[in-house]
Image: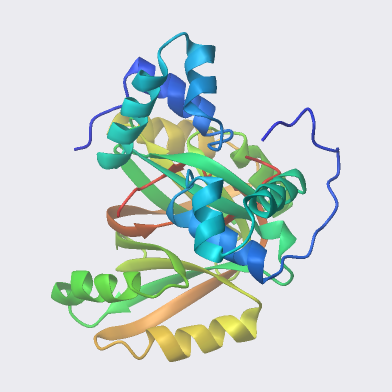
Amino acid sequence: MNDLSAPAQPAHIELDAIDLAIIELLRKDGRMPYRAIARELDIAENTVRARVRRMEESDTMRVVAVTDIEAAGYGMLLAIGVQVEGRAPEAVAREMAAIREVFSVNVVVGAQDIEILVVAQDQAALNELITDKLGAIPGVRRLTPALALEILKNQPDWVPFHAA
Amino acid sequence: MRRKLDQADAAIVERLSRDARVSNREIAEQLGVTEGTVRARVKRMEEERLIRITAVTNIDRFKDAALAYIWIEVERSGQTRVIAAKLAEIAELGFVGVMLGRADILAITMVRNAEHLAEFVHQRISVIEGVRGTRSTLGVNFVKHDYRVARIVN
């Protein structure tokens, strides 16, 4: 998406059945040609082009390359629960979001205040991330990590665009 | 272990991670390589499951959408993989992982609200044979998700 040509605050658009059908096809193959999409849905190629453009410009959908964590050089993925004390969880969450290896940050309700997903190259890098970076953030009381031994499914289809 | 992207692959992926609808020709021109090189490398990376080119949608554009973390404990440790495989078949789950610590399995999904989450867990997860118990956490503010990295499975 060309951010320079996009309006600062794109208008909210309503998606209809055609939009959703296009998204469904692009989820399976992001580089499916416009002509093939048109044929599949029995609509004009120009309609497909216009719909994709409208969804991209309104910041509703993006077609992107997702890199495998191992191919990106990371050997480990962890889900870490964060308990916060004496500081707004949102403020701690934003500070964590600025760290590259922290790829997902959610402020939650329950036993934890924040749930984050992190990647690390190896055990030494993980130790540094948890002890020196995450543990040192003001307001962090306790980090409760779980290591993913095997990931059977990971399709980040719905995500916030603003922080990506 | 999957191979790490080399420098030429990484340059192509960097371009595609911003907008994957860009043509191979345009990438080739920007990187000073041939269109055939770009096409072959993209094809190879997809075949080796190093990258996946896909549409992602903005969660902020959907009304009443919250992320839910569902931590699952199984009856016997030996059942973990079988149960995780069953969970992976549930279309609504975006993440399923066998975990070390906190619980046996973590599943992540998008729900409308707490009632919807309770209904989903009750009707779709607790009914799976061997599921001993679940603990769920509902997201109230999705601050970040870098969709450019994920574990590519299929």
Q: In this view, does A11 lie to the left or right of A90?
A: right
Residue A140 drawn above or below residue B4: below
- Which residue occupies the foreground of this view, A80 or B63? B63
In percent of width and height, residue A152 lies at 29, 60
Residue A3: quarter of image:
top right
Q: How is the image coloured?
A: rainbow
Residue A4: quarter of image:
top right
- Which residue occupies the foreground of this view, A134 or A119? A119
Residue B64 drawn above or below residue A126: below
In percent of width and height, residue A61 lies at 65, 51
- Which residue occupies the foreground of this view, A120 or A141? A120
View extreme (left): residue:
B78
Q: In this view, does B56 lie to the left or right of B2?
A: right
Q: In which quarter of the image is the N terminus of chain A?
A: top right
- Which residue occupies the foreground of this view, B11 or A38? A38
Q: Residue at x 67, y 41 (%)?
A: A163
In percent of width and height, residue B37 lies at 35, 19
Q: In which quarter of the image is the C terminus of chain A?
A: top right
In percent of width and height, residue A60 lies at 70, 53
Q: Can the viewer see residue A125?
A: yes
Numbered circles on residues, count: 0
Residue B20 drawn above or below residue A77: above
Q: Which residue is drawn at 31% across and 87% down?
A: B128
View extreme (top): residue:
B32
Q: Which residue is drawn at 38% across and 66% down?
A: B106
Q: Can the viewer see residue A156?
A: no
Q: Residue at x 30, y 55 (%)?
A: B154
Q: In this view, does A73 lie to the left or right of A138?
A: left
